[in-house]
Image (cartoon, rainbow, N blue to C red):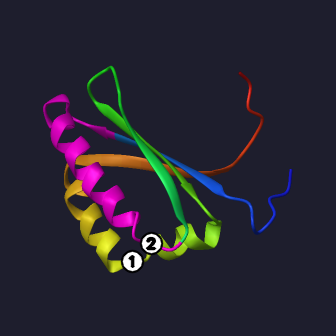
Amino acid sequence: MTQAAADPVVLINVYTCKPEQLDTLMELLAVMVRTQREAEGFISATLHRGLNGKVAAVHAVWRSREDWKAMARSPAVNAAMEPIMAIATFAPHLYEAGEVIE
């Protein structure tokens, strides 16, 4: 499946931290996503708290891969990421939409 340039992309980013830092991580992720919301091409984001107490995930939808790349270079977003990187590791991946099964 080839992605058209105009198709939205989905970012799923999983963060791992120590259990005692999960509340702080969730707060920092909310700040970061609110900063990203100002970027061109932002559509939506949902934050998820892992039930195991040491992971969090962000599911975000961007208008295009190019919009996501531009956001990732933003000084404001990078500043919001600094405290997150101090307490968590993360693994971001971009996806194209697939089949919805209900």
Q: Are marks 2 and 1 in contact (CB under 8 Å)?
A: yes
Task: Report which residue position mark 2 lands on.
Answer: 39
Earlier in the chain: of badge 2 and badge 1, it is 2
**Secondary structure beneath label 1:** loop
Disc 2 versus disc 1: nearer the observer: 2
Residue projecting furthest to the left: 20
Under mark 1, the amino acid is: Ser
Residue 25 in the image: x percent, y percent? 22, 44
- Look at 39% across and 70% down and name the residue there: 38
Frontmost residue, 15 versus 34: 34
Question: Chief secondary structure of the magenta span?
Answer: helix
24 on left or right of 42: left
Residue 22 in the image: x percent, y percent? 21, 35
17 on left or right of 61: left
Q: Which residues are magenta?
A: 16-40
Relative to 22, residue 52 above or below: above
Relative to 95, residue 39 above or below: below
Q: Is residue 59 magenta?
A: no
- Look at 25% across and 42% down and name the residue there: 26
Relative to 53, residue 67 above or below: below
- Look at 85% across and 57% down and name the residue there: 2
Task: Report which residue position mark 1 lands on.
Answer: 74
